[in-house]
Structures are given as structure tokens and as C-alpha cells.
Image (tube, rainbow, N blue to C red):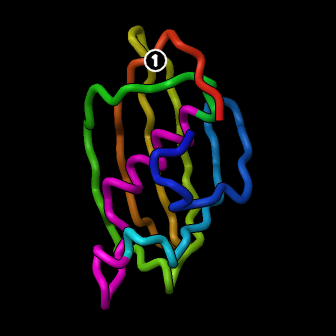
């Protein structure tokens, strides 16, 4: 289940140990870009954070609930008309009450987002 309603598509995904790399394509025609912003579309940071959560849920097979953002840095503006292809690198580490996710999001070789977040895992199974 995606809360972003076709905002993005996962093109590919691979796992290496506790790390996951997903190639994501942003839909530049999505209505959210009409309001953020009409003449200069920018991918909202909160949408990028939601993609991180949804990718992690998909990889883990469980619903996650954000508990804490340890750090977040939006390092570059993501314009879906110029750079619709993003690479999400998630390093997921188990914790006593959930998982810690270290995230890097790239546009080509440029880092767009760096974040470290802590999530609790729902006891209910999650499937897409």
C-alpha cells in the first residue's frame, strides 16, 4: 500500500545484507507538483521521507511507525522534470524496539537526502 498514490514507481530493488538499494522513478505529472510549486516543481521532503518508510516496509514485510528522526539533511532540490530517477540506499539495523534506518538518496551522483530515523515495527504483517 502506498500513501502517495502513484507518486513514484520502484524500478528495481536489490538487497545486500542489511542494506537495500532501490531505483525509484518520480511521476512528474503527479498533482502534488502542481501545488509544490506550479512553475518550479520540487519534490516535497516529506514525500521523500514517506518513500523511505514505504520502501523499508516493503523490504521488511512489516508496517513501520516513525519514532524519532535523529538527523535529516535535504542536500539538493529534486525537480522531477530534471531528475525523475532517484536511488534510495537504506541501511536497516535492528534495535530492541524496532529498526534504525540510515538513508542516502541520490540523483545520479548527487546526494539529495541524508537521514537517520528510528521506527517501531507493527505486530501486524504488511504486504503491498
From this viewpoint, which residue is outermost toward the bottom? 39
Q: With respect to residue 73, does 106 lie above or below?
A: below
User: Observer-nearest residue: 19 or 50?
Assistant: 50
Q: Is 40 part of what is drawn in magenta?
A: yes
- In percent of width and height, residue 94 lies at 50, 18
The residue under label 1 is 121
Q: Is residue 85 left or right of residue 101?
A: right
Give the residue displayed 35% in from the left and 47% down from the top. 115
Classify mark 1: helix, strand or loop. Answer: strand
Instruction: Please provide the residue range marked out in magenta.
Output: 34-57
Which quadrant: the C terminus? Answer: top right
Q: With respect to residue 112, does 18 lie above or below?
A: above
Q: Is residue 84 left or right of residue 99?
A: right
Q: Indicate the quadrant where residue 6 lies.
A: bottom right
Give the residue displayed 52% in from the left and 71% down from the top. 107
User: Observer-nearest residue: 35 or 78?
Assistant: 35
Q: With respect to residue 58, does 82 lie above or below?
A: below
Q: With respect to residue 125, does 17 lie above or below?
A: below
- In percent of width and height, residue 8 lies at 56, 61
Q: Is residue 119 left or right of residue 125?
A: left
- In percent of width and height, residue 10 lies at 66, 55
Which quadrant: the N terminus? Answer: top right
Q: Is 38 part of what is drawn in magenta?
A: yes
Check disc 1: other Cα within 10 Å, few if <14, some if 14-19, many if 20+: some
Give the residue displayed 56% in from the left and 49% down from the top. 89
Q: Indicate the quadrant where residue 101 lies.
A: top left
User: Observer-nearest residue: 58 or 86?
Assistant: 58
Give the residue displayed 46% in from the left and 17% down from the top. 121
Query: For the stretch drawn in magenta, what is the main secondary structure?
Result: helix
Amino acid at each position: 500500500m502506498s500513501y502517495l498514490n502513484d507518486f513514484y514507481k520502484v524500478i528495481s530493488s536489490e538487497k545486500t545484507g542489511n542494506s537495500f538499494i532501490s531505483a525509484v522513478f518520480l511521476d512528474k505529472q503527479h498533482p502534488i507538483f502542481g501545488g509544490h510549486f506550479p512553475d518550479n516543481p520540487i519534490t516535497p521532503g516529506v514525500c521523500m521521507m514517506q518513500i523511505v518508510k514505504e520502501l523499508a516496509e516493503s523490504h521488511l514485510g512489516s508496517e513501520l511507525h516513525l519514532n524519532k528522526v535523529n538527523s535529516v539533511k535535504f542536500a539538493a532540490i529534486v525537480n522531477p522534470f530534471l531528475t525523475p530517477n532517484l536511488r534510495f540506499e537504506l541501511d536497516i539495523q535492528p534495535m530492541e524496539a524496532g529498526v534504525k534506518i540510515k538513508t542516502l538518496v541520490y540523483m545520479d551522483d548527487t546526494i539529495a537526502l541524508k537521514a537517520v530515523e528510528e521506527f517501531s515495527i507493527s505486530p501486524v504483517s504488511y504486504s503491498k
